[in-house]
Every structure is written in structure tokens, then in C-alpha cells.
Image (cartoon, rainbow, N blue to C red):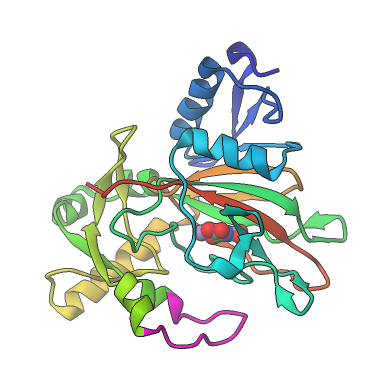
């Protein structure tokens, strides 16, 4: 276990996604083995390990080895004692949700509305809803590199130097199953102003071009008249999540999955309800300014 030569990727067959086998994250990982995992992750954009019996300490330590971690502003969703772990769950304990109940139910990438969006997220499945022997609550991932590559040349030329406005408020006010949210306070708004990013960004490690738009947070294209912005954005949003760019992950408890927030976007499938329980935990890597 955990020797570089035993580590292998089994590609999903979709545009992105691979299972990495030959790794036990509860055991030590030397630098060569770790570097191999990082290389496979960058190549496949979504990489997962099955059957990982890891503690929250090990989840945090592995994630931190990839880079510096974020602590989410929603304090009520952090795992007690582990501020680097953001809980995504529908479970209510003592009358209180243990985490975010409706995270990611639209297409998005994590923290894309910040000046420095997250580089990647490390997601661990603790409880997965099951019905009639089938796991529910899948997550869909779309490759932003495959989407970019498939654009027609004239569209590539047209969007090359455009910028997109990412808006936290747009995502915040969209429909959710936990019901309408309280308006953002002035202080919250001040922390998450709308921000412009390149519409086509370059991956910091692979150098590949990634289409940086998503349904959840992309509000408009900067500098274009409103009708042009609307029609171009609608085209790009539809294009970015075509079936041929998607890998859909069917979770098993003890999966640890890495997704790249530059080369992919994702969406949670909300097809389960209590009493079917879902409990996932996310470590979120800091990222740099998109270029
Ligand atoms: C997230 C997220 C999707 C899911 O935690 O960032 O989008 O399937 N989760 O829970
Ligand atoms: Mn997310």
C-alpha cells in the first residue's frame, strides 16, 4: 500500500473523473506517492478513493498537504473541533441542522465569487442515503476544460478577453429546499461584493484553458450590452454542462473525493429526504487570483 508504483488511476470513461486505487489514506504517504496522486488528480480533474477509513484529523492533514485551507464563514456549519471541515448534511440534531442542508444544488464551483476562488475541495462521505439498495444524493461534475475545448473557434475568439461577473448574491437568493433566506446584511454584502474574473481562465498547474461560468453565480458578462450579455451567458451556461462533459459520482460511505474548482464545476442531486440521512464533510483549499 501507498508505494508510488502501486498507485493507479481507473478513468471513469467520461470526460473527467477517475478512481485512484492502491492508496490507504490512513497510512503514511511518502512524497513520491503524494506527488503521483496530485498528478493524477490534475489530469482527471475529479479523483476519488474508495473505502477510506479516516479520522477527521487525517482528512484535514491530507487536505492541508495539498495546500492552505479555508475556514468557511458559516460558523454554524463547521464540524465542532475542526474548523477546516465544512459539514454538508440534512441531519438535524437537538433541533439544529448539523451543517449546510442545501449546499450546491445548482451548478457552481466553490468560492468562485471571491477574489481568490478555491483551488480544490476534498470531500469525505460519512453517511450516504440509500433506497432500495441504491445510493441517492449523487454529485455531478462537469469538465470546464472539455467544455472550453469543444467551443467553436469563432466563440473562442469572441470570449478570449472577456470578463464575467460572479455574484455571491445571485446564488444566495436562488431557490433552495430550506426555503427563502434572510436578506444579506450590509456587512455580509461588503464581504462578498460582485467580482469580475476572466471568462476563460488558465489552470495554474496544467496550463489548460477552462471556461469559468456557472449557473449559480455568474450574473453577466462585463462590458457588453445587457441583451448580448444575456444571450452569450445563456449559450455558455447551456454548453458548459452538456451531458458529454459530465461525470456523475454515485457515493459510497468512506469515499474521499477531490474536485478541482478551476477545471470543473459541480451540482448536488437533491433526490432524497429525511429519514434518509446524508452526511458529508468538505475541506476547501485556498486558491489564487484567476488569470
Ligand atoms: C459542496 C457541494 C455537493 C454535494 O460541498 O461544495 O457543492 O453533493 N456539495 O453535497
Ligand atoms: Mn460546492
Whether residue 36 is situated above or below residue 129 in the rendered picture? above
Whether residue 76 is situated above or below residue 7 in the rendered picture? below
Q: Quadrant of the N terminus?
A: top right
- Give the x, y percent position of residue 217: 37, 69
Q: Is residue 240 left or right of residue 125?
A: left
Instruction: Work out whether residue 186 or residue 182 is closer to the camera in this orientation and state it.
Output: 186
- Give the x, y percent position of residue 194: 27, 71
Residue 225 found in image quarter: bottom left
For image coordinates 30% across by 37% down, the residue present is 204
Total marks drawn?
0
Residue 192 can be seen in this image: no
- Give the x, y percent position of residue 21: 66, 26
For image coordinates 47% across by 46% down, the residue present is 69
Whether residue 18 is situated above or below residue 74 in the rendered picture? above
Q: Is residue 119 left or right of residue 91?
A: left
Q: Which residues are magenta?
A: 172-185
| Dominant SS type (magenta) | loop
Q: Is residue 91 left or right of residue 288?
A: right
Instruction: Work out whether residue 11 or residue 5 is closer to the camera in this orientation and state it.
Output: 5
Amino acid at each position: 500500500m501507498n508505494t508510488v508504483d502501486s498507485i493507479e488511476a481507473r478513468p471513469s470513461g467520461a470526460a473527467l473523473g477517475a478512481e485512484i486505487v492502491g492508496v490507504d489514506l490512513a497510512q503514511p504517504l511518502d512524497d513520491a506517492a503524494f506527488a503521483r496522486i496530485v498528478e493524477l488528480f490534475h489530469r482527471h480533474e475529479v479523483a476519488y478513493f474508495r473505502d477510506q477509513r479516516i479520522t477527521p484529523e487525517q482528512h484535514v492533514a491530507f487536505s492541508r498537504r495539498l495546500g492552505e485551507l479555508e475556514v468557511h464563514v458559516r460558523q454554524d456549519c463547521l464540524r465542532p473541533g475542526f474548523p477546516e471541515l465544512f459539514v454538508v448534511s440534512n441531519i438535524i440534531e437537538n433541533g439544529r441542522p448539523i451543517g449546510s442542508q442545501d449546499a450546491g444544488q445548482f451548478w457552481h464551483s466553490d468560492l468562485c465569487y471571491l477574489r481568490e476562488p478555491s483551488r480544490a475541495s476534498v470531500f469525505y462521505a460519512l453517511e450516504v442515503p440509500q433506497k432500495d439498495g441504491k445510493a441517492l444524493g449523487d454529485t455531478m461534475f462537469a469538465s470546464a476544460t472539455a467544455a472550453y475545448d469543444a467551443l467553436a473557434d469563432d466563440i473562442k475568439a469572441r470570449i478570449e478577453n472577456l470578463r464575467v461577473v460572479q455574484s455571491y448574491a445571485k446564488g444566495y437568493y436562488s431557490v433552495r429546499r430550506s426555503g427563502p433566506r434572510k436578506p444579506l446584511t450590509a456587512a455580509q454584502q461588503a464581504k462578498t461584493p460582485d467580482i469580475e474574473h476572466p471568462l476563460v481562465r488558465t489552470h495554474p498547474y496544467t496550463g489548460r484553458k477552462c471556461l469559468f461560468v456557472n449557473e449559480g453565480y455568474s450574473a453577466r458578462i462585463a462590458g457588453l450590452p445587457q441583451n448580448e450579455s444575456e444571450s452569450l451567458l445563456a449559450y455558455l451556461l447551456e454548453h458548459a454542462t452538456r451531458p458529454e462533459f459530465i461525470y456523475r459520482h454515485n457515493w459510497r460511505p468512506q469515499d474521499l473525493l477531490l474536485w478541482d474548482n478551476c477545471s470543473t464545476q459541480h451540482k448536488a442531486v437533491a433526490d432524497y429526504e429525511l429519514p434518509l440521512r446524508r452526511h458529508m464533510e468538505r475541506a476547501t483549499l485556498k486558491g489564487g487570483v484567476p488569470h
